[in-house]
Amino acid sequence: MRPYLFLLLIAVSFSSAQQWPEPDPCGFADTTSLEYLLAASGNWGYGYDTLLYDLTQWRQSPFVTVDSVGLTVQLRTMYTVTIQDTAPDPLHARKRVWVHARTHPNEVQGTWVTNEMIKALLADDTLGRTLRQRYVFNIMPMYNIDGVELGGTYDRENANGVDIESNWNAANPQPEVLVLRAQFQKYMAMPNPMAVMLNMHSAYACRRYFVFHAAAGTSPLFAAMQERFIGYVRSFFPGAIEPSTYMVSWKTGPALQYPESWCWLNHQEKIMALTYEDGNCAAAGKFDSTALAILKGVDAYLQDTTAITGIFADASGMDPRDFSLGQNYPNPFNPSTVIPYTMEKEGPVTLTVYDLLGRESAVLVRGNVAAGRHTARFDAAGLPSGLYVARLSAAGRSEAVKMMLMK
């Protein structure tokens, strides 16, 4: 037995298991057990050195870019892995999906699911090729690197002893939080901002589930969007993932301290931001099946226009690549904004703005439009602040974006 592990065993033998403030989707560990301490001494089975090795393997793929994006408290380099097709797609900016794992070092199952997602994205099969062509994936496989390397004493904290999962509203956030926030800000300023943000954890309940944000803390529209997203993921792994009602948070209002809080407070329904909890237990497994279900669920959700627009359901057999609707700019706006859209071939088009009750606020375009890139200006001088939806319809199919008017 290693000397430091022996001393750690003596120290914890006189302490009780740590209890964490409720609600805590991850639960807490029995930190007094020998099995737990042995796992902690080995970085719970996946350490920083292993990540560095995996990065060298992943970056051999032509579809992968590895970037150093910042430093931890103890000056370890934080990395992101970007995965997308190498072929340019000038007319259709790929929708962006963000994934980060290992906020809590002892929740290694979240890392294993994430690594299986990377494996599937790089595969030379129909799913891998389709996902790379349709989306750009930005993945941070290990967020709390110092906590991983420091072992059992830091099973949920960084080197400063702070839980960086709930540090987002602090007056002086931890370095890791600042790095992750900077990534979010960078990508949300791009023409193809994050459409999905997944925060990968694991829970001692030994169940697979997403943490659902109640309508009281978000909006009825976002609640419906979450139901659809979680439903899609569950459909690809029947009986393995709990329904959305299993873990419900924000029942009386939005929390302020989490990554999802930042997404909601700044971008509302624009980002499907959710925490996923895998099983943190000896019975956990099938990480590949879980990863495939999540990836297929993301694809089904982002390909389903009704998932994005909620009450504005529409369907047809038209190829969605015949036209595209871009994000308005600026957004938020006051009182006017510009909405870009592209037609790959000439045809009749309608561009309409609705409020969240489905009431028509303005018709910006109605008629035949030539192929090419176009813009339409929406002037909301006479409308109240709030969220609006612009819908572009052509040949029975539609795309939509959400716009925030802030007066």
Image (tube, rainbow, N blue to C red):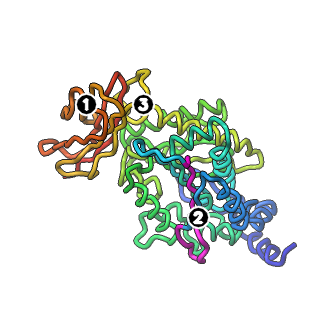
- Marks 2 and 1, Cα distance to the nearest angstrom? 44 Å
Question: Hey, which quadrant is residue 292 in on the image?
Answer: top right
Q: Assess whether residue 169 is covered by the magenta stretch.
A: no
At horizontal 19% and vertical 43% (from top left) the residue drawn is 377
Left or right placement of residue 304 versus residue 353 in this view:
right
At horizontal 66% and vertical 64% (from top left) the residue drawn is 155
At numbered mark 2, what does the secondary structure look like: helix, strand or loop?
strand
> What amino acid is found at the position of numbered circle 3 in the picture?
Pro
Question: Between residues 379 and 131, which one lies in front from this camera angle?
Answer: 131
Q: Quadrant of the N terminus?
A: bottom right
Question: Between residues 190 and 305, which one lies in front from this camera angle?
Answer: 190
Characterize the local packing of mark 2: few (<14), some (14-19) or many (20 or more) Cα atoms within 10 angstroms: many
One can see residue 19 in this view:
no
- Marks 2 and 3, Cα distance to the nearest angstrom? 34 Å
Left or right placement of residue 357 versus residue 192 in this view:
left
Question: Between residues 357 and 339, which one lies in front from this camera angle?
Answer: 339
For this orientation, the residue located farthest to the left is: 382
Q: Which residue is mark 3?
A: 320
Give the label on residue 79, or none.
2
Q: Which residue is mark 1?
A: 369
Q: Is residue 200 above or below residue 5?
A: above
* Front position among marks 1 and 3: 1
* Front position among marks 2 and 1: 1
> What amino acid is found at the position of numbered circle 2 in the picture?
Tyr
Are the residues at dot 2 and dot 3 in contact (C-beta closer than 8 Å)?
Answer: no
Tell me which numbered mark, 1 or 3, is placed earlier along the sequence: 3
